[in-house]
Amino acid sequence: MKLFLDDFNVFSELNTQLTKLQLCFDKCKEFAISLNLEKLMFFVHLGIILGYVVSMEGKLLDLKKNSAIVHMPTPKTPKDI
């Protein structure tokens, strides 16, 4: 499980996914953490999380989110910096 402020992601193999999700939901219930049903996603093989494309192969930068930085002009003067 990865946590970030008010979000969490559960990573696992398909055969253990339901067990791990149940553990997470049990903890949410124990600590009275409510879930936004509109934001829930299950069994996602590829997703964009915090500027990264996350999949079974690992995580890569989401170039769409980072295109402003990639295409930023090189500063020429101290003021440009």
Image (spheres, rainbow, N blue to C red):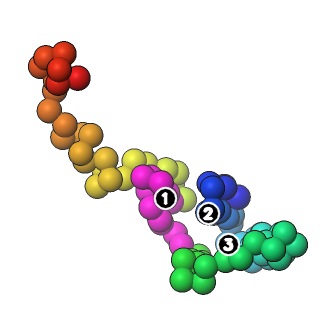
For disc 3, the marked residue is 14
In the rendered structure, which amino acid carries the disc numbered 3?
Leu
Instruction: Determine whether 72 is above or below 67 in the image.
Output: above
Residue 50 image position (x, y, % from top left): 47, 54
Task: Read off the residue under disc 2.
Answer: 7
Neighbours of disc 1 within 10 Å: few (<14), some (14-19), many (20+): few
Q: Secondary structure beneath disc 1?
A: strand
Give the number of the disc on residue 63: none
Quadrant into which the C terminus falls: top left
Instruction: Characterize the magenta stretch by its predominant secondary structure.
Output: strand
Magenta residues, start to end: 44-55
Mark sitting earlier along the chain (1/3): 3
Query: Which of disc 3 and disc 2 is earlier in sequence?
Result: 2
Cα gap from disc 1 to disc 3, whole angstroms: 20 Å
Which of the pair 12/49 is nearer the observer? Answer: 49
Q: Nearer the viewer, mark 2 or mark 1?
A: 2
Q: Does the magenta stretch include residue 24?
A: no
Residue found at x 25% / y 47% = 67
Q: Which type of secondary structure does the marked residue at label 2 adopt? A: strand
- Residue under the image location 42 percent in, 52 percent down: 51
Tell me if residue 67 comes above or below residue 41 in the rendering.
above
Please report contact status of discs 2 and 1: CB closer than 8 Å, yes or no. Answer: yes
Instruction: Give x and y (percent) for residue 43.
Output: 59, 76
Name of the residue lying farthest toward the bottom:
37
Q: Quadrant of residue 4?
A: bottom right
Query: Outermost residue toward the left?
Result: 76
Q: Label 2, label 1: how many angstroms apart (C-alpha)?
A: 10 Å
Which picture quadrant has residue 19?
bottom right
Secondary structure under badge 3? helix
User: Sequence order check: which comes first, mark 2 or mark 1?
Assistant: 2
Horizontal relation, residue 52 to residue 68: left or right = right
Q: Which residue, given by chain and number where applicable, does mark 1 sit on?
A: 49
